[in-house]
């Protein structure tokens, strides 16, 4: 799905979190929103998900104006920074949640739900953990379960907020590769937020560098490395 | 003795003294009296006790105490949950006043609550006057007992659930919404199960308190044998007749109910800790 | 295509709709008014039914004066004793690791699940005339049942867990590092307690004492059983209220009740102040 962000601005009270920003996300791309904390990257991601609503501007999903679309109707698979797994449910129940929450007419039969959940657990390479509770999983496993849960609703796109932020360095490298593979298999338009320039430049097709509520530069990792558009981008991406 | 009780040595002083004071006070004030009551029961003998508890009047009183406590605690379970949610999540005029007032039943002496409720709901009372034409009698009926027990048990569920609601991570609710769940579905399937252990604990505490409640009930109840006579009142009546054996039998039955509820509270806490753990 | 205006959803996705909120708040307010505020107002309305003079006259009667005095004395003895017990229990439980700790905590909480009437009954069984301890006490001219010591014991029984319950979670959270530091600096045990531990727990202690005192002054069931209700001698304020009420001396009964209700309001006020100002220094969960 092609995502078009048109002159989106967001204010919290008097605080300006986003100046009007515009961005086109090509269908099937893997995009990184890169910036320090307070740059507006998470706000932009949450606006895409329908968790926040912009003060002005609009969001287009292909030809559909999605600006006022509720979070439930938006069908954006969202992976939270701390995963937000339901800890009173097993892994299986977590992944099945979005399917079971559908209205009766759209809800798949229980056998079909089972098939889909198991297929997703295979995809994240954790086929045998369906009966466990989140508290019995490692950090990396939790992240992958959160990913499977977001994919279960057949999302229009995949949104990830600092997906590797809570993990140690070794696991982070492995899971980076995992996300790339899942993106390539599903072909979903994927946007992830990070403050780690190395992660953004290595993993994404397209990197959006943000600072203080504005987009500083949009480009392929190689472009950003070779031709930083501002001093900020040069300083932030040099490491 | 110290070496035997302590699991690991501590550099801090005062174990012997503090432990001694604690055990002495606990024994004199709580344990010895309860042991004396149990001892009296042993002397009477289980068969005799059983027979006394089996008399119609005592059975009716115990059943009434338990039934009324159950009704009131169920009401408080639902109302307490709503109240806790409103106090934590909503911002409105008067919120702090209500939050402070929740503890009124803890602070107001039960006898005061009892005569106040009776004055309100008696047929000539401020609220009783309005209800009588509708054919609703509250004072001197079982409804009156329910009302008194609702008053006395109101704070328990609110105060056990409130801190748990405060700690709910908003991300979890957002996650549910991004997965397509309606608000009602989120409340039912995500929030309610998270609150369940605290709800049950609050419910059990309210139930334990209301089963044994005396002061707030006796004024409004009417105290008719077989109809509105609660078990603690029957103990008092038997004591005034110097019938210590019958009083002991009722007392032990109530003690047994208390212990059972204490056990349930502990099991709930262990179960929820094991199942949910920390994420 | 240019400026598309739409109504921004002010409410976040993690709350109910405005209409639902309004209805729920309305229902809550009505129920609170009927269940909590109405009885409170009724106490004062009934007390002042025949005017201030009649109300004050009721309070000035010798029986009422004796009841007020007895209630104050009982609280003045039972509350400090329970505070001392609470501090000792919290110290032993939080600073040391010993066998049977979980059982002990359950036993301390026991009075909360025992009917006050059963508590009174148990005390009668221990100290009454037909137990060997009671017989021995009477032989030595010490009366517990139907006398002042029994009232104090009954009051202590029902208020037993209040202070300990408030202190244990707070002291658990604070750990023992500060006390250990004081000891390495050469402070004695008592000095460590008074200069390090006590300042850390003073607000939680005050909170526990406040709740303990409110319950102590208002206890009815346990005291009703053990006091024998000897007019002017073993009648505390709640017992006196019952007697006056049963004698149809409504104004006098409610006047005494109003005094206790004022005390309850004062307790709530102080409690709320403590919670707002010292929230961090009180137990993490405000349970009772």
Image (tube, coloured by chain):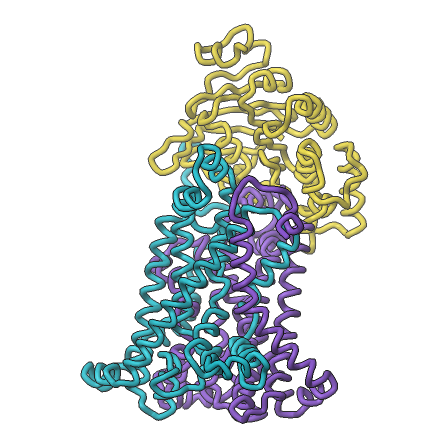
| Residue A197 horizontal/vertical position (percent) | 56, 17
- As displayed, is residue B177 above or below residue A49? below
| Residue B33 horizontal/vertical position (percent) | 57, 74
- As displayed, is residue A10 above or below residue A172? below
* Colour in which chain B is drawn: purple
Q: Residue furthest left?
A: C53
Quarter of the rendering containing residue A74: top right
Q: Which one is in front, A43 or C203?
A: C203
- Quarter of the image where the N terminus of chain A is located: top right
Q: Is residue C208 visible?
A: yes
- Tell me the residue at 48%/86% (across/down): B221
Q: Residue furthest front?
A: C140
- Tell me the residue at 43%/68% (across/down): B106
* Colour in which chain C is drawn: cyan
Q: Which one is in front, C117 or C81?
A: C81
- As displayed, is residue C276 above or below residue A225? below
Q: Which one is in front, C13 or B129?
A: B129
- Tell me the residue at 37%/76% (across/down): C39
| Residue B119 horizontal/vertical position (percent) | 37, 84
| Residue B108 horizontal/vertical position (percent) | 39, 71
Q: Is residue C10 visible?
A: no
* Colour in which chain A is drawn: yellow
Q: Residue furthest top?
A: A226
Compared across the picture, whether B129 is left or right of B199 comes to left
- Quarter of the image where the C terminus of chain A is located: top right
């Amino acid at each position: 799905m092609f995502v078009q962000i048109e002159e989106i601005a967001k204010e919290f009270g008097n605080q300006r979190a986003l100046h009007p920003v515009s961005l086109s996300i090509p269908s099937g791309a893997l995009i990184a929103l890169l910036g320090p904390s307070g740059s507006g990257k998470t706000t932009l991601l949450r606006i895409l998900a329908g968790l926040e609503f912009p003060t002005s501007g609009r969001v287009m999903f292909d030809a559909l104006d999605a600006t006022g679309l509720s979070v439930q109707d938006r069908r954006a698979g969202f992976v939270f920074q701390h995963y937000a797994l339901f800890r009173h449910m097993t892994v299986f129940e977590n992944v099945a949640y979005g399917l079971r929450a559908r209205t009766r007419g759209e809800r798949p039969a229980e056998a079909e739900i089972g098939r889909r959940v198991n297929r997703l657990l295979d995809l994240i390479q954790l086929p045998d953990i369906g009966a466990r509770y989140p508290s019995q999983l490692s950090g990396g496993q939790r992240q992958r379960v959160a990913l499977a849960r977001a994919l279960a609703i057949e999302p229009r796109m995949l949104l990830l907020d600092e997906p590797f932020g809570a993990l140690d360095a070794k696991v982070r490298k492995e899971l980076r590769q995992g996300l790339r593979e899942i993106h390539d298999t599903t072909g979903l338009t994927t946007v992830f937020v990070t403050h780690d320039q190395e992660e953004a430049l290595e993993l994404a097709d397209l990197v959006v560098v943000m600072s203080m509520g504005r987009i500083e530069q949009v480009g392929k990792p190689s472009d950003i490395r070779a031709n930083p558009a501002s001093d900020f981008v040069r300083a932030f991406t040099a490491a | 003795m110290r070496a035997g009780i302590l699991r690991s040595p501590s550099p801090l002083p005062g174990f012997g003294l503090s432990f001694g004071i604690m055990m002495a006070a606990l024994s004199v004030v709580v344990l010895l009296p309860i042991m004396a009551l149990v001892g009296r029961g042993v002397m009477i003998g289980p068969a005799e006790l059983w027979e006394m508890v089996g008399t119609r009047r005592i059975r009716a009183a115990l059943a009434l105490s338990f039934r009324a406590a159950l009704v009131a605690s169920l009401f408080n379970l639902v109302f307490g949950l709503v109240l806790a949610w409103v106090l934590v999540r909503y911002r409105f005029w008067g919120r702090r006043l209500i939050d402070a007032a929740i503890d009124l039943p803890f602070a107001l002496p039960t006898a005061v609550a009892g005569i106040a409720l009776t004055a309100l709901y008696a047929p000539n009372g401020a609220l009783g006057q309005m209800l009588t034409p509708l054919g609703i009698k509250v004072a001197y009926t079982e409804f009156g007992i329910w009302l008194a027990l609702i008053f006395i048990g109101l704070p328990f569920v609110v105060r056990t659930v409130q801190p748990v609601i405060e700690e709910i991570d908003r991300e979890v609710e957002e996650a549910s919404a991004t997965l397509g769940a309606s608000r009602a579905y989120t409340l039912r399937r995500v929030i309610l199960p998270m609150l369940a252990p605290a709800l049950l604990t609050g419910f059990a505490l309210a139930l334990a308190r209301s089963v044994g409640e005396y002061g707030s009930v006796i004024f409004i109840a009417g105290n008719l044998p077989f109809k509105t006579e609660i078990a603690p009142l029957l103990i008092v009546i038997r004591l005034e007749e110097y019938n210590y054996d019958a009083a002991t039998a009722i007392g032990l039955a109530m003690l047994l109910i208390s212990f059972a509820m204490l056990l349930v509270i502990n099991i709930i806490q262990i179960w929820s800790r094991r199942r949910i753990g920390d994420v | 295509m240019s400026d598309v205006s739409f109504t921004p959803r002010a409410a976040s996705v993690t709350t109910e709709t405005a209409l639902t909120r309004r209805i729920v708040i309305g229902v809550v307010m009505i129920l609170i008014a009927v269940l909590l505020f109405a009885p409170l107002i009724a106490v004062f309305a009934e007390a002042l039914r025949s005017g201030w003079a009649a109300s004050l006259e009721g309070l000035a009667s010798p029986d009422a004066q004796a009841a007020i005095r007895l209630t104050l004395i009982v609280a003045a003895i039972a509350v400090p004793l329970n505070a001392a017990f609470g501090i000792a229990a919290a110290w032993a439980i939080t600073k040391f690791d010993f066998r049977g700790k979980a059982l002990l905590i359950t036993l301390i909480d026991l009075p909360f699940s025992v009917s006050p009437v059963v508590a009174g009954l148990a005390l009668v069984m221990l100290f009454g005339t037909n137990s060997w301890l009671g017989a021995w006490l009477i032989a030595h001219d010490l009366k517990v049942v139907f006398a002042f010591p029994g009232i104090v014991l009954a009051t202590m029984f029902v208020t037993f867990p209040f202070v300990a319950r408030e202190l244990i979670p707070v002291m658990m959270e604070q750990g023992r590092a500060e006390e250990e530091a004081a000891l390495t600096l050469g402070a004695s045990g008592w000095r460590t307690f008074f200069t390090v531990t006590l300042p850390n727990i003073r607000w939680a202690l005050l909170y526990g004492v406040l709740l303990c005192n409110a319950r102590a002054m208002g206890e009815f069931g346990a005291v009703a059983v053990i006091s024998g209700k000897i007019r002017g001698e073993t009648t505390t304020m709640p017992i006196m209220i019952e007697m006056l009420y049963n004698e149809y001396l409504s104004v006098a009964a409610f006047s005494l009740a109003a005094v206790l209700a004022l005390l309850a309001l004062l307790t709530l006020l102080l409690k709320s102040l403590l919670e707002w100002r010292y929230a961090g220094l009180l137990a993490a969960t405000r349970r009772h």
